[in-house]
Amino acid sequence: MVDFHQLFSQSWAQRAVILPKPLSLNRAVDKFGDTIYFMLSEHRDEAVATAFFNQTIDANGLPNKVVMDKSVANYAGLENINMLLMCWQD
C-alpha cells in the first residue's frame, strides 16, 4: 500500500503573496504539519476566532485536541464553540 502522505511530503512549493495591507492568517494543521484549513482576516478578535473554529470543524470534523498560542481571542473563540456544542447536545 502506498503511503500518500510520505509520497507527497517529499516535495513542496512556496508561493509568495503580496497583500495590500496587513492581514491575520489563521491556520489549522494536522499532526503531520499539513494545513487542513486556513482563513485570512483583517482583524484578530473573538468573532474571527469563533468563525475560524466553526468553519474548520465544519470542514474537518471535531478534533481530539486543539493546541494554540496564548491569544485571548483564540481562547474566547474556542470557548464560544464549546458553549455552542454543549447547547447543541442538550
Image (cartoon, grey):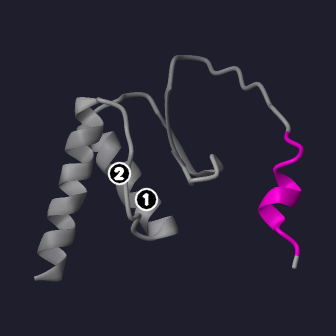
Q: Are marks 2 and 1 in contact (CB under 8 Å)?
A: yes
**Residue 55: mark:** 1
Q: Is residue 51 left or right of residue 33?
A: left
| Picture quadrant where residue 70 is located | top left
**Residue 51: mark:** 2
Question: At 85% from the left edge and 41% from the top edge, which residue is drawn?
Answer: 12
Mark 2–mark 1 distance (CA, rounded to whole Å) = 6 Å
Binning the other alpha carbons within 10 Å of mark 1 as few (below 14), some (14 to 19) or many (20 upward) gives some
Residue 59 x %, y %:
51, 66
Q: Give the magenta part as a residue range.
A: 2-12
Farthest residue in the front direction?
A: 1
Question: At 82% from the left edge and 58% from the top edge, which residue is drawn?
Answer: 6
Farthest residue in the top direction?
A: 21
Identified by mark 2, the residue type is Ala
Identified by mark 1, the residue type is Gln
Q: Is residue 50 left or right of residue 36?
A: left
Q: Quadrant of the C terminus?
A: bottom left
